[in-house]
Image: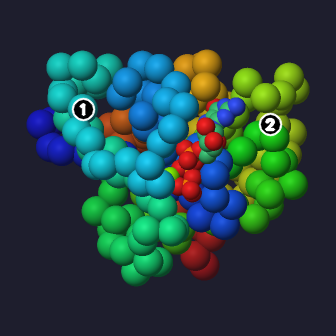
Amino acid sequence: PHMSRNVHVLNQCEPKVGKTSLIMSLVGEEFPEEVPLRAEEITIPADVTPEKVPTHIVDYSENEQTEEALKEEIIKANVVCVVYDVTQEETIDKVFFPVCLIPIILVGNKSDLRSGSSMETILPIMNQFSEIETCVECSAKNLKNISELFYYAQKAVLHPTAPLYDPEDKQ
Ligand code: GTP
Ligand code: MG
C-alpha cells in the first residue's frame, strides 16, 4: 500500500517523559541536548522505512496545544505511541490511554537511567487495554530501541496481530 501513515507520539499527565527527544533522536541519529517543546511534524520517506511506507510522525505538547487539538490529531493517526518515563514507575498508573480504535504502542523512555525493567508494572496495564499492541523500553539518550519503536508502530498499522476490540467485551 502507498497510503500515508501517521505515527503519533503522545503522552499527557506527566510531561517531560522525552516525547520530543525520541523523535529528534530518530531523525538526527543522535541525542539532542536541547529540544523545543514540540517537534515539527516530519515525514519519513518510504524507502528508508522498514515497511516501505511513508510515515508521518506528529509530536504533542500539552504546553502548546489544547486537548481539542490532541483529539483532532488522534482522529488522523493510525497508531499512537504512549510514552512514560521508566524512572517514574509510580506514574505509569496515571498514563492516559486515548479512547480510540487504533493500536497503541506503550513506550518506556529513559532506560539509560535505570538497570531493571518496568515490565512487571506494565503487564497488568497491557492486559487491561487490548488496544496496546506492544510495549518497548528505549532511550532517546543512548539511541536504544529508537528505530525499533517506530518499526513496531509501522508494523502495528500494517500487520495488526490482534483485533482492536473484543466483541465479547461489548455484550
Ligand atoms: P514536553 O513536551 O514538555 O511534555 O516534554 P517531552 O515529553 O517532549 O520531553 P523532552 O523531549 O522535552 O525531554 C524532557 C527531558 O528529558 C529533557 O531534559 C531531555 O534531555 C530528557 N530526556 C529525554 N529522553 C531521555 C532519555 O532517554 N534519557 C535521559 N537520561 N534523558 C532524556
Ligand atoms: Mg515535547
Say whether disc 2 or disc 1 marks the residue closer to the N-terminus: 1
Q: Position of residue 104 (x, y in %)?
A: 52, 51
Label 2 to label 1: alpha-carbon separation: 30 Å
Query: Please, is residue 113 above or below residue 76 in the view?
Result: above
Mark 1 burial class by Cα count in 10 Å: few <14, some 14-19, many 20+? some
Kindly tell me whether mark 2's CB lies below 8 Å from ligand 1. no
Q: Quadrant of residue 29?
A: top left
| Residue 32 position in % (x across, y down) | 49, 30
- Image check: 73 left or right of 81? left
Q: Residue at x 15, y 36 (%)?
A: 1
Residue type at mark 1 is: Ile
**Closest to the observer, 12 or 77:** 12
Q: Residue at x 42, y 71 (%)?
A: 65
The reply to whether residue 163 is visible in this rendering is: no
On the image, the x and y values in percent for residue 112 come to 73, 24
Q: How many marks?
A: 2
Can I make out residue 128 in this image?
A: yes
Mark closer to the observer (2, 1) = 1
Q: Is residue 112 left or right of residue 104?
A: right
Q: Is residue 119 shown above or below 127?
A: above
Q: Which residue matches tag 2?
A: 119
Q: Residue at x 58, y 76 (%)?
A: 170
| Residue 56 image label | none
Residue position for label 1: 44
Amino acid carrying mark 2 in the image: Met
Nearer to the camera, 81 or 63: 63
Residue 49 image-quadrant placement: top left
Q: Is mark 1 within 8 Å of ligand 1?
A: no
Extreme left residue here?
2
